[in-house]
Image: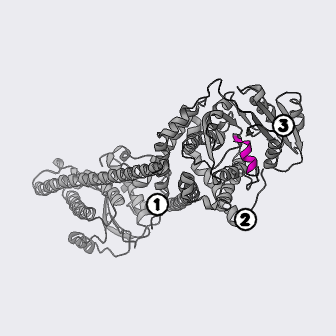
Amino acid sequence: MNPEVLAYPFLFVAIFFESFILVTLLSAPARYGRARRFVPGSITPSVAIVVPCFNEAVTLTQTTESLLALHYPTDRLSVILVNDGSKDDTAAAMAKFAGHPQVRIIHKENGGKHTALNAGIAVTDSEIVGCLDADSFVESDALAEIIPCFEKQNVAAVTAAMSVAKPSTILQHMQNAEYIFGITVRHVLSSVNGLYVTPGPFSLYRREIVVALGGFRSGHQTEDMEMALRLQKHGFAIENAPRARVYTKTPRTLMGLIRQRTRWTSGFLRNVLGEYRDLVGNARHGALGCLVLPVGLVSIFGAIVLFSNSLFLLARHALAAPALRSGVPLSYSLVPSAHTLDWFYAPLDLFPALALLTVLAAIALIAIGKRLSRTPGSLTLGLLSYLLLYGVVAPLWLMRATADVVTGTHRSWR
Amino acid sequence: MSLHSRNALIALVITIAIIGTVLYAVNYLNRQRIAELSAIENQISIDTLSLDTQFSLLETAPCGSVSENTELSGELGDLGDRLSYAEGQLGSENTRVIALKKQYSLLEIRDYLVTRELASACGTKPVTVLYFYSNAGDCADCDNAGYALSYLRTTYPKLRVYSFEYHLGVGALRTLESLLKIKNTLPAFVIQGTASYGFTSLEDLEKQFPKGALATATTSTQK
């Protein structure tokens, strides 16, 4: 059997999902979501943003200052800094804000991010509570963009539009394009209540719902995903504010990235195939149950199959090449022949054509995400690195995470 | 119907339409390739007639008026490349490809005979290789040998390489194989009239050419 045949079902799913995203983007609920604006003078619920910190001395000051600069009535906004047993100078960094009327500081024994969030939520009676990872920074209008999304009572959480804070390495540029791709997908899926994660960088919740559901749990080291799935399971809606920009620090190195994504992916697999298995394929949970979670699972499996398939074909060609050359100079193999310009030799075949289409659609979704969120900066490097690297590096953490889940391996957070 | 169901249905229709369009485009291109091959086939039919005439003219015309490399041999190389590519795209079982390959083999034999006739009548010294291969899975080194010969043909433009699929089942080809006493041990080469079997490397293949033969094959850029 031609190994390419294995790839077709996954290419079909990829094209189908991208088509669904583009069609839903044009639907009325998504259009309404984009048009939603904060009207000055409208209701401003009390908001408390919890910043869980474990060894975040370097970035904490900037994170807190960005929160205090939010355009929101100061008497309705508070910031709760929770020191989760840090070993570095986090306590000293927090002390700089000790006298600030909007800031409250909590020191506790290390217990994990979810315990820090719960500690923060426990000391506030604000209607809305939010989380901002201590390595992330918000735009001043981010909260004003998010608050109108709580207009419906069944909306339990609202997510923001994430991008990478000052990308410098090629991997960070790649992640920036990926995050901006995520802005489009998150915006579209929220319009059909299909979100399964409320990311640490600036997701906000109705406090009474979070408390009623028992607060945050470890959730296999993905407390944001577990909370989102629990909200969905209980029939609540999760909204998205595509212009609520938040910038987050991302891993600079490949190993750091693989560690982070292994945690995310294994968390997804353990949550979705574990406690929240009944959501998958469940028509009661609409797009999330019938489309988003099944496609998420298939895409992990598909990426591994496609990558293994490509690796196999590459290895086969690489092994055959020296024998095929049999002394023929390498220059002959590398220099394109005159045939390249002849239509007769056009390399149009089903597999490369479909693969090209999925890539073009991904580029379109990234461009849409940038425009939707009005994220500043050039995306040229991001797009290039995303196109060249993502398909090579993403399978590494997908395979590692899948292997961890299959073998029951648990890794530390960092 | 819910919004997500409706959109999923639309997305499904779009997906099927996209894949259908790509499939149609691929098939259309393949049909165009066949049409192109047919056009070349027609041209070659004319060239064959011209070749017959050239044979007759040889008997009376002075050698200087007949090109050492007939026009047909230039077209043969191009047709061979296209046939090889079309075979890769459409499969070696494609009946049209097989029919074209048969005709191609006949033309190669005719060109080979003309070349020999010219050499005998006019004293020219063409460098020729008859290469017998198989796509039936019984020739492990044929891909490597074919690649090496392509390189030689590109490097030495006056080298005349005639490739024949051993199992093609054309009467004239069987006769040629029988006359040259080619055994079913592929790949097989007949270089300047001497048969050899098997392929190890380009270097070894080059050693089978008479000394200086390849050097003289670089004197012209005509294919």
| Residue B212 visible to the viewer | no
Q: Amino acid at mark 2?
A: Gly
Q: Chain of mark 1?
A: A
Q: Would you say residue A67 sits in the magenta stretch?
A: no
The percent coordinates of residue B85 (x first, y second) are: 34, 56
Cα distance between the residues tagged 2 and 3? 34 Å
Nearest the eye: B51 or A145: A145
Q: Chain of mark 2?
A: A
Give residue A408's mark: 2
Q: Amino acid at mark 1?
A: Glu
The percent coordinates of residue B191 (x first, y second) are: 34, 64
* Residue at x 26% of width, y 62% of height: B101
Dividing the image into 4 quarters, which one contains the N terminus of chain A? bottom left
Cα distance between the residues tagged 3 and 1? 50 Å
As drawn, is B140 to the left or to the right of B193? Answer: right
Cα distance between the residues tagged 2 and 1? 31 Å
Mark 1 is surrounded, within 10 Å at the Cα level, by few (under 14), some (14 to 19) or many (20 or more) other residues, namely few
Task: For mark 3, give the secondary structure.
Answer: helix
Q: Would you say residue A211 sits in the magenta stretch?
A: yes
Q: Is residue B27 above or below residue A146?
A: below
- Disc 1 designates what residue? A4
Nearest the eye: A373 or B208: A373
Number of callouts = 3
Instruction: Tell which circle, 2 or 1, labels the residue nearer the N-terminal end.
Output: 1
Q: Chain of mark 3?
A: A
- Disc 3 designates what residue? A57
Task: For mark 2, give the secondary structure.
Answer: loop
| Residue extent of the magenta highlight | A204-214
